[in-house]
Amino acid sequence: MDESNIPIDINIGKLQDWLVSRRHVNKDWSKSVIAVREKINNAIQDMPAHEDIAALLTGSYINYFHCLKIIEILKETEADTKNLFGRYGSQRMKDWQDVVKSYEKENLYLAESAQMLVRNINYEIPSLKKQITKEEQIQNECEKKHADYLKNEASSKSEFLTLCKQLGIKGNKIKKELVERLKELPEIYDKIGKSLKPLKAGIELYSAFTKYILGEESPEVLPMLQYVIEHGNTTVYEWSYGEPPLSVEPDPIHIEIEEDNEAGDGNQIDFGDNEIDFGAIDAPDAGDAAEIDWGNIDLVTNNVDVSADVAEISLDESGIVVEEQGVCGGVARGRDALTLLDNPPTRNQFLDQLVELESFLKMRLYETNASNESQSFSLIQQLPTESTAALAAMLDAVHTASSALTAPEIAHLHNVKHSPRYVDVLTAQLQQKLTLCDKLSRLAERERERQRVASERAVSMRPLVTRLIERTKELQLNIEKEISKKYKGRPVNIIGGVKFL
């Protein structure tokens, strides 16, 4: 077999050691190449404007084979400096020819090229690929986080809108809108009070049942429910004293509307500020105290100081009766000025009676069904009875009334009116939803920006990897050719090189 056809296989990891062991390069070649690199740096300072030279000088480390190409280009650009003996008078050409001669001395170019090949294959190219993979991972993570932030933002926004819908507000100026909604509460309560007529049948059944069990002397059942059904949602004063007040002076409601910043309008909302001036009664002189004519009393209503302990004066057939009532002369103030469904204690009492009626009807419905299924004699058969359908209708009426009064919107507004602390908590809760939406929006935008930057970095590095791989392949071929020349043209294969990337 012809020896010239036997290939020489060199592992990429042992290429440099192979060159040293075959005495193609010196063991301490790296010290000698420093001077060559300095010559290259000086020669680069004075280069002609040429596209091929610019392409060679960018994107990779200049090696011996690049220097050869630069000389070929200078042969064209510096052709006018060539003398009769074929030598170039251009300093540029002399500098690069000197660089090539220094490289060829002791085969420095071969050692340096082998080092570049190993570094590119083992470090540079894998590092760039790893960076691209990392940037792609960052893109995927940013895209996922962006979607999660948008999803959470939509969820928080939905919760905000749901709560605003329960409150019946738009959510632009929360406290101000809540205050405006409070003005609708009296009308809402009056409407609920007028819608309680269907409860009458259930109350009558409950009353009849109670009388049957306890006798005629049984106490009145569900007094407040019956009162509201008959008289409507009156004031607590009228419920307590059996007559409407001459005037109503509810306590003002103070809610600080910080978000509106309306200094001119003040931050206190005053519901009802009607001062009633009853005047003053002209009292007789002290000297006339012993002689009082009870048959002719002149009441002059000028500047009366009304207090909670003023005695109520009433006339009957026998004359004048003075009774210490403490009702302020028919003026409803404070809690007495609130309606039954608005005043927290009476509202709770009203709801308790609804629950009591509901429990009774549920039990009667259960007992009626049990009585229909069983033919045995029981006390239930002797009690006032109603059909299952009628009991179910009564129970539905109770549920309707209870749902209307305990609806989320009404419950929130009731708490807002009677608890300033609740207003702050509710407003803070809504503001927190909006703040969270803004934060999530900013985070989503930040992740979108990170994704864009990572994408740009990956895009910018892909051409670098492609160009580095191409030049590394070219460098490997050049090294194989140079080694082949030293062995009379035998084929040389560098195993584990660019082909395995």
Image (cartoon, rainbow, N blue to C red):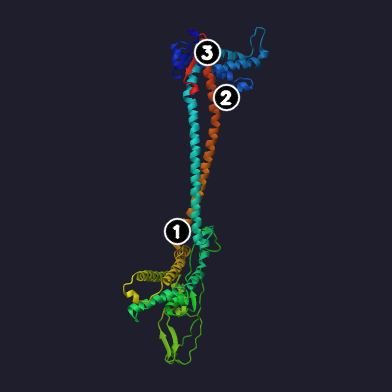
Report the residue at 50% width, 44% height from top. Answer: 146
Q: Earlier in the sequence, mark 2 or mark 1?
A: 2
Amino acid of disc 2: Thr
Residue 477 x/y as whole percent: 53, 17
Disc 3: CA contacts within 10 A as few (<14), some (14-19) or many (>=20):
some
For marks 3 and 2, give the CA distance: 24 Å
Q: Is residue 432 above or below residue 85?
A: below
Q: Secondary structure at mark 3?
A: helix
Disc 3 versus disc 2: nearer the observer: 3
Label 2 sits on residue? 58
Label 1 sits on residue? 425
- Left or right, residue 217 beside residue 103: left
Q: Secondary structure at mark 1?
A: helix
Query: Could one spot residue 221 in this view of the protein?
Result: no
Disc 1 versus disc 3: nearer the observer: 3
Q: Is residue 398 above or below residue 454?
A: below
For marks 1 and 3, give the CA distance: 83 Å
Q: Earlier in the sequence, mark 1 or mark 3?
A: 1
Occupied quadrant, residue 209 = bottom left
